[in-house]
Each structure stands twice: as structure tokens, then as C-alpha cells.
Amino acid sequence: MHTNLVELDKRIRIGAVSYLNTHPLLYGLKRSELIDKMELIEEYPSKIADMLLNDEIDIGLVPVAVIPLMKEHHIITDYCIGTEGEVASVALFSQSPIEKTERILLDYQSRTSVALAKILLKYHWKLDIPVEDAKEDFGEQIQGNIAGVMIGDRALEQRKRSAYIYDLGLAWKEMTGLPFVFAAWVANKKLDEGFINEFNAANKYGVAHIKEVLAESHFNGYDLETYYTKNISYRLTDKKREALQKFLGLLKEGTVS
């Protein structure tokens, strides 16, 4: 039997990624009446995913690659961190063409992007390049024939330093013809429908107020208006759901490890 957390007057534990791309969604949440009903925790993606798996939070804006690892999951809103093509903040960076790459470092902050990179290497670029998990501050190691998959705000900064940028959202679109979903609001238990409706409305409010979000954002590494309106696509459309199922299908087939 599922516990109705709202009826028990228990604060819903919500984990969200602490990246620029989540600001519109969090803008809405922080201005809704729900703020008094929840405990908001901000961390990097793979950390939020672990917290959701360990039931340390009830809802997480998590990398979708964590879904197959969950005993129970519910995608609870019509909003996500997605892209219709070029996402800008998730890419493989290098100083030489990908064909000359000898080793790829994988961002420790990511699950979905790392899995996506492996899928693209196998099916899109058709290259067998050794990969390894990166440590913190691995940007300095991206030189010569060593490339790196980097996500989030650091990736936007890395765009100014790398000679070659292979955008993973764009590569997926070229391979499948579909958009991509990097993260979605996922609950690990059933929640009150009224709460979910309010939560969805708060997301909608935030996405509808990009100008206000821009006024509060301070980042010189990339044009945020372009980022919020052209690169990131927040609506979880039917096409994005189709893309999500295709991606999870590839994970289930064991195409990446």
C-alpha cells in the first residue's frame, strides 16, 4: 500500500540538478505554494539519481538512464530537460577530430550523457575508442588525442576552449531523427494527484517566464537566451517520449556498459 505523503503533512523531498538548464523549472517551483510542502535539494545529476534510488528523496529531476535501475518509477510532469537538436551543454570535446581520438574521458556527474555517448560511438560514429571515468577538473586533460564528454555549465565554458565540439543532442537527432530527453521529473512512489497537478503547473509557470529567469541569471560563458529558448526544450512531448523509449530500449539491449 502506497503512503500518501501529502495527506500525512510530510514535506515532499525533491532533488533537482543545480545547473543553469534547471533554472526555469526551479523558478516556477520556488514561486508556487508548493514551496512550503517540499524540501528542495540541489546537486549534480548522478548524485540526485543515487538519492532517488536510495529513497533519500521522493522526486528527482534525474538523468533518464536511472529509470531501468528503479523498482518503481513514475514520470510525473509534462516537463523535462530535453532538446530538439543542438543542446550545447552536453558534448564530446576534443582538440583533434574524433577519428583520431585515442581515449575518451566520461563526466562523473552524468549517467544519461555517458550512456548516450557510448550509444553514439557504436551506432552513429561507428568507432571503437577506449573510454574511462573522469575525475574532478578533467577539462585540463582534454588535449592532444584525448577527448572528454562534459555536461552542464562546465560544458558551456568548455566550448570556448575546444577545437572540436560534437554535440550529443545533435548527433542523436542525426542518428534517429528524434529529439532527446536528458532528465525528467521522476518519483519513486505514487504521490497525491493534487500535488502532482500543482507541481506540473509550477513547472509550466517557470517555463512561461524565461525573461524573468534571464534577469536573475548571471553567466558570461554562453548566451542564456539562446540556451533557454533554442537549445533546451522543456516540454515532454510525444516525440520526446518516443525518443526516451528508444534510448531506454538501447540500454535494455545491453548495448552500453
Image (spheres, rainbow, N blue to C red):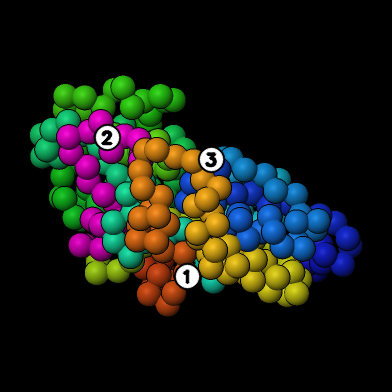
* Eye-nearest disc, 2 or 1: 2
Q: Is residue 204 left or right of residue 130?
A: right
Along the viewing direction, whichever of 89 and 3 lies nearer the viewer = 89
What type is the residue that disc 3 sits on? Answer: Tyr
User: Magenta span covers which residues?
Assistant: 155-175
Q: Are marks 1 and 3 in contact (CB under 8 Å)?
A: no
- Which disc, if any, is residue 44? 3
Residue 49, visible in the rendered structure: no
Q: Residue furthest bottom?
A: 238
Measure the C-alpha gap from mark 2 to mark 1. 30 Å
Q: Secondary structure at mark 2?
A: loop
Measure the C-alpha gap from mark 2 to mark 3. 22 Å
* Residue with the mark numbered 2: 160
What type is the residue that disc 2 sits on? Answer: Lys
> Which of the marked residues, 2 or 1, is nearer the chain's N terminus?
2
- Check if residue 146 falls in the magenta segment: no
Which residue corresponds to the image point at 80% horizontal and 58% vertical from the top-left? 37
What type is the residue that disc 1 sits on? Answer: Leu
Q: Secondary structure at mark 1?
A: loop
Residue 178, visible in the rendered structure: yes
Q: Quadrant of residue 257?
A: top left
Q: Are marks 2 and 1 in contact (CB under 8 Å)?
A: no
Residue 137 coordinates in the image, percent (x, y): 40, 24
Which residue corresponds to the image point at 15% horizontal and 44% vertical from the top-left? 127
Q: Is residue 202 above or below residue 153?
A: below
